[in-house]
Image (cartoon, rainbow, N blue to C red):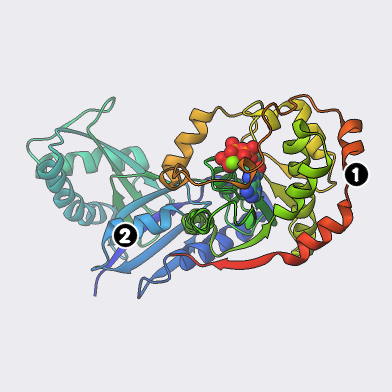
Amino acid sequence: MDKKIYIVRCGETALKGDNKPYFERMLVQRIKKAASDIQGLEVERVDGLIFVRTPEDVPEEDTLKKIGRVFGVDTISPAKEINIEGLTGEDALTAIGQVAVPMMLELIEKKGIKTFKIEAKRADKAFPIESPQIARKMGAIVLKGCKVLSVDVHNPDCQLFVNVRRNMAYVYERKIQAFGGLPLGTNGKGMVLLSGGIDSPVAAFMMAHRGMYIDAVHFHSYPYTSERAWEKVQDLARILTLYTGRMRIFSINLLPIQEQIVQNCPEDETTILVRRFMIKIAERIARREECMMLITGESLGQVASQTAEALVVTDSAVTIPVMRPLIAMDKTQIMDIAQEIGTFETSIQPYEDCCTVFLPKHPVTKPKLERIEKSESYLDVEGLINAAVESAELTIINPA
Ligand code: ATP
Ligand code: MG
């Protein structure tokens, strides 16, 4: 049976010098995994490109969706493959034309294109016709086969790419932009502090986009926070698994700590004290689970706990690096990404977060570290953290 073929370009992974083969091999693995439910899938690496083949009856949109979510994939072109082995230059172009002309006729019918331009590339220097000549000759063949078309080199309705490689030629007219980034697993593992909000899922996505595996820690205040709020977090994680693969969530009830803080510390410091506990607990679990960094969805100045002063006081609670990929982004930009990756609609469902349970009326916006540490001295910080870490429950979210 005939195969559908897709040319996948690796973008940034192609720039990695000596590491290039490693990145490309990783990418091939990731593509195979992301599309593993397609029976008869073939993924092959050839000279800096990746060729994906599926049986003819697998819908194109389905394949594009699956490959398009793989980090490290820059662009994808559904293509037609033409065997030109043993043909002379002219005969090869005629053979290519026999595929290119019907393709263009279909575009005229479906999209009403009127003008086109050929982009030719001769990757096999042994092929006797040079790229500009290929473009000219193919242009003539298309014009002859599609009488309604004319050439427009500046602003064509359609660009027809002709790629001549050894024994094989490829024609395609689309370059679909994917997420780019780096293949998962090329940059260690991080632990995201995952709430049910808009920001932290976007932060997790952005770090995974740079090749990082993601584990998550989630804090709740059950029974003040509901079972439904926890389900929402799992729903968000499930959406993220489309990009990150299987995700592990460590969930922790923060209520015992919040109660201690409320009873023993100044009310206006509640938020920052809770945040320091959260990040310390996350640090412990991250080290235990061999995560190299923490990831949060904080953005400078977004709320009282995210002023520069508050971030410094939060950070000084831990020694593990804390990544804040959204730090300099506006809420609207973050919301745009949330829309794009499909988490937004779930994030805006109105369920309570543990942070809102004991919200002080006037939280300090410029906390001083000495005062915060003084307040913590009224608490059994170590004991509370140990108990919290021990109580963590693991939930594994598998890709939908
Ligand atoms: P988000 O939209 O991600 O909830 P936010 O704007 O509501 O963020 P905060 O509630 O101040 O901001 O939280 C800042 C960051 O702290 C979050 O992005 C997340 O990384 C972490 N965080 C907040 N609440 C929780 C929670 N319940 N469990 C785990 N992490 C949390
Ligand atoms: Mg939140």
Is label 2 in a helix, a strand or a loop?
helix
Image point 16% across, 43% down: which residue? 142
Compared with 381, 266 (above or below) is: above
Mark 2–mark 1 CB contact (< 8 Å):
no
Image point 62% across, 28% down: which residue? 302
Residue 357 shows in the view? yes
Residue 80 shows in the view? no
Going by the image, does 82 lie left or right of 318? left
Q: Position of residue 64 (x, y in %)?
A: 35, 55
Q: Nearer the viewer, mark 2 or mark 1?
A: 1
Image point 51% across, 46% down: which residue? 180
The residue positioned farthest toward the left in the image shown: 147
Q: Amino acid at mark 1?
A: Tyr
Residue located beneath label 1 in the image: 378
* Disc number for residue 70: none
Q: Quadrant of the C terminus?
A: bottom left
Residue located beneath label 2 in the image: 62
Q: Position of residue 84 (x, y in %)?
A: 29, 61
Q: Is mark 1 within 8 Å of ligand 1?
A: no
Q: Position of residue 355 (x, y in %)?
A: 64, 42
Compared with 39, 273 (above or below) is: above
Badge 1: how crowded within 10 Å, few (<14), some, or many (20+)? few
Badge 2: how crowded within 10 Å, few (<14), some, or many (20+)? few
